[in-house]
Every structure is written in structure tokens, then in C-alpha cells.
Image (cartoon, rainbow, N blue to C red):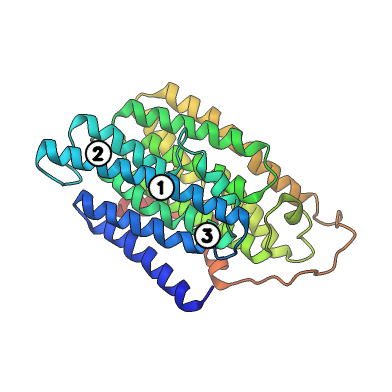
């Protein structure tokens, strides 16, 4: 893509997200979401492949439907209350706005577009879609969290954790695995949203860090399939080792970064006397743990002395300082979790 066009698209993404973050008005928030949607579509189709065109079309139709629902609900709410304020919602429109924002995020059962879209686009665009594009809808959801129906949040959260784990088990494409991983992590965030919005924000920031570290590692190795990372040890042993640790961090194993949000969420659920919900959530998360461990096992099989026959460096690895920084954060933030929670 032309560098000037790429800069314009990235700048538009930044402007759209910033506009939504700074707005107290539903119309301005909607405009920011629309700018975000339109800015990423050229990035999806920068390689003119039929799968990329199909992914961009699916993404546009889904996001346009959610945006229309947001606009109609906000208009009807303004007609009823006389206010466009984000935090002033009347009862019927809170549910429709929440559902529309969850559709933009890709929460189950409104998740069907997300795996197919991420599978059809390049890794770099998949990184933007999995991290940056979720900031604006999540911010709006945080702002209306005190008005949202608790039963809706718990249902969507548990469904997303189950679908995120179940859908990723049988996948061989790394981009689809990351999509189902995203669905599962968003389920954890929505589950605790009503009880403790600050904990949801903390979980969201760590999710962005860990997902970015994983995508940067995959981009460094140009890997999109399990079969490709299974033979990557001779090419970059250090990167493969850190990628295995990032996967275990995404799975939520101690003492890595990903353990802290899960621990804090379970403790918060126990504090709210919802022990059954906490137990079901932990059991459901075992599905996701299985496919993370499966990926790690695939990479361990190629460690010495089980090196595959072609042990030559058949492709140059492009390691960047950004990859190293994000990987370090994705592995070592756990001891600093209490500090971050106090700041929030």
C-alpha cells in the first residue's frame, strides 16, 4: 500500500477512536465508530485476494448493522428523554445499545463474523482488528455499565467463554485461534463488567498487551498455520520460546501476566457471593486452556533433540524492538498488578 494512503488510514483510525473516547454525545460517538469502520476496510483489502474482499464485505455489513442499531436506539432514546448524553438512557434502549456494542466487539452469540474476517485478512490488519478496533466499543460499554442488565451480561459472558474455548479446539489456522481467543477473553471482561468496571478495564489492557505480543511474534515468523510454527525452532529459538510463554500467559497460567485478571475476576465473583458462576466460569475456561496447551505442545515437539530434518534458516526472521517490548509486558506484569489496580 502507498505509504501516504497507509498514513491517512492509520490517522483516521486514531481520530475515530479519539472522537469516541472524548464524546459525551451519542451522535459524536457514532461518528467516531463509523470513521473507525471505514478506515480499516482499505487495510483489509490491501492485498486484492478474494478472501480479503469477502472478509472486508462481511466486516462492513456487520459493523454497519450494529452502527444502524446504535443510531436508531440513541435517536429514540433522545426523543424519549430529550437528551443525547451517553450516560442518560431509558430502559428499553439500554439493552439494544448494549447488544449493538457487543456485536461490534464480537461477543457470542454475535461472534460469527469475527473468525471469518480475521482469517481472510493479513496478520498486521488482524492485529489492529483484535486490539485497536475494540477500544471504542469497550469504552462506550464501560460508560453505560451501571445501566446494563446483569442477566444479559452474565449470559453473554458465559456464552463467549464457552464459544471461545469450544471454537478454538479444532482449528489449524492461527488467525482463527486468535479470533476465538479474543471472544473468550472478552467474555471474561463482560462477565465482571457490572460488578467491577475498573477490573474490566484492567483485563482489557492486559488482553491488548498479550494479543499484540502474540500477533507481533506471528508477524516476525510470517506464520499463519500450526504446521508452520511447528517447524520454526531452527529459525528462531528465542522467539519460539517467548511465544510459548505468551501462549501460556493467554491461557492464564501463573506466574505469567494473564493469570492476574483471571485471579482477580474469580475473587470478585466470590466476593459478590456468586460462587456457582465463578465455578462454571473456571470450568468453561478449561476448554481454552486445552487449545493453548495444544499449541505449546506442537512447538515443544520440535525442540532439541527432536529437531526436524530441515534445520536450515529457510526464512529470515524480522525481530523488532516492539515485539520484544510487548512480549516482556505480556509475561512479567503479574507482580505489578496491585499497583495498576490502585492507579485505576
Mark 1 vs 3, N-terminal side? 3
Q: Relative to 37, does residue 66 appear above or below in the rendering?
A: above
Q: Position of residue 217 (x, y in %)?
A: 62, 61
The Cα–Cα distance between marks 1 and 3, rounded to whole angstroms, is: 14 Å
Binning the other alpha carbons within 10 Å of mark 2 as few (below 14), some (14 to 19) or many (20 upward) gives many
Residue 314, percent from left and from top: 80, 69
Decide which of 164, 69 is in the foreground and name it: 69
Residue at image coords 67%, 55%:
224
Sequence-earlier tag: 1 or 2: 1
Q: Of the residues under marks 2 and 3, which one precedes in the sequence?
A: 3
Q: Is any part of residue 253 visible from this angle?
A: no
The quarter of the picture where the N terminus appears is: bottom right
Residue 3 in sight in this render: yes
Considering every residue shown, the one lying at the far top of the view is 276
| Residue under label 2 | 73
Which residue is at a point 65% across and 40% down the rendered structure image? 291
Quick one: SS at disc 3?
helix
Q: Is 77 positioned to the left or the right of 34 in the image?
A: left
Q: Nearer the viewer, residue 54 or 149?
A: 54
Q: Quadrant of residue 71?
A: top left
Furthest toward the right, the residue is: 309
What residue is at 49 percent from the left and 25 percent from the top?
280
Rendered location of residue 149, percent (x, y): 29, 29
Local secondary structure at mark 1: helix
| Residue designated by label 1 | 63
Residue 44 numbered mark, or none? 3
Residue pushed farthest left?
Answer: 82
The residue depicted at 25 percent of the width and 41 percent of the height is 72
Q: Is residue 132 left or right of residue 79?
A: right
**Crowding near the residue tagged with mark 3, few <14, some 14–19, many ≥20 C-alpha atoms within 10 Å:** many
Amino acid at each position: 500500500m502507498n505509504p501516504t494512503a497507509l498514513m491517512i488510514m492509520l490517522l483516521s483510525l486514531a481520530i475515530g477512536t479519539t472522537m469516541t473516547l472524548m464524546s459525551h454525545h451519542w451522535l459524536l460517538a457514532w461518528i467516531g465508530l463509523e470513521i473507525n469502520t471505514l478506515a480499516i476496510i482499505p487495510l483489509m483489502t490491501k492485498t486484492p485476494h478474494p478472501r480479503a474482499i469477502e472478509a472486508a464485505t462481511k466486516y462492513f455489513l456487520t459493523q454497519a448493522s450494529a452502527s444502524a442499531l446504535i443510531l436508531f436506539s440513541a435517536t429514540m432514546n433522545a426523543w424519549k428523554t430529550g437528551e443525547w448524553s451517553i450516560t442518560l438512557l431509558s430502559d428499553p434502549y439500554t439493552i439494544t445499545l448494549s447488544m449493538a456494542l457487543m456485536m461490534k466487539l464480537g461477543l457470542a452469540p454475535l461472534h460469527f463474523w469475527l473468525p471469518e474476517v480475521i482469517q481472510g485478512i493479513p496478520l498486521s490488519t488482524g492485529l489492529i482488528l483484535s486490539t485497536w478496533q475494540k477500544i471504542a466499543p469497550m469504552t462506550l460499554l464501560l460508560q453505560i455499565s451501571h445501566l446494563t442488565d446483569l442477566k444479559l451480561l452474565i449470559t453473554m459472558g458465559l456464552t463467549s467463554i464457552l464459544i471461545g474455548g469450544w471454537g478454538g479446539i479444532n482449528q489449524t489456522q492461527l488467525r482463527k485461534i486468535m479470533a476465538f481467543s479474543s471472544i473468550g477473553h472478552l467474555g471474561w471482561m463482560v462477565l465482571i463488567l457490572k460488578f467491577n468496571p475498573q477490573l474490566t478495564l484492567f483485563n482489557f489492557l492486559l488482553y491488548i498487551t498479550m494479543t499484540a505480543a502474540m500477533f507481533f511474534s506471528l508477524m516476525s515468523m510470517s506464520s499463519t498455520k500450526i504446521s508452520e510454527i511447528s517447524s520454526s525452532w531452527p529459525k528462531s529459538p528465542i522467539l519460539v520460546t517467548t511465544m510459548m510463554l505468551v501462549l501460556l500467559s493467554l491461557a492464564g497460567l501463573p506466574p505469567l501476566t494473564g493469570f492476574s485478571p483471571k485471579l482477580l475476576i474469580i475473587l470478585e465473583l466470590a466476593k459478590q457471593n456468586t460462587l456457582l458462576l465463578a465455578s462454571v466460569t473456571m470450568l468453561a475456561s478449561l476448554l481454552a486452556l486445552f487449545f493453548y496447551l495444544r499449541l505449546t505442545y506442537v512447538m515443544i515437539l520440535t525442540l532439541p533433540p527432536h529437531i526436524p530434518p530441515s534445520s536450515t534458516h529457510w526464512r529470515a526472521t524480522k525481530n523488532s524492538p516492539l515485539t520484544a517490548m510487548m512480549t516482556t509486558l505480556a509475561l512479567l506484569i503479574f507482580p505489578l498488578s496491585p499497583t495498576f489496580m490502585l492507579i485505576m
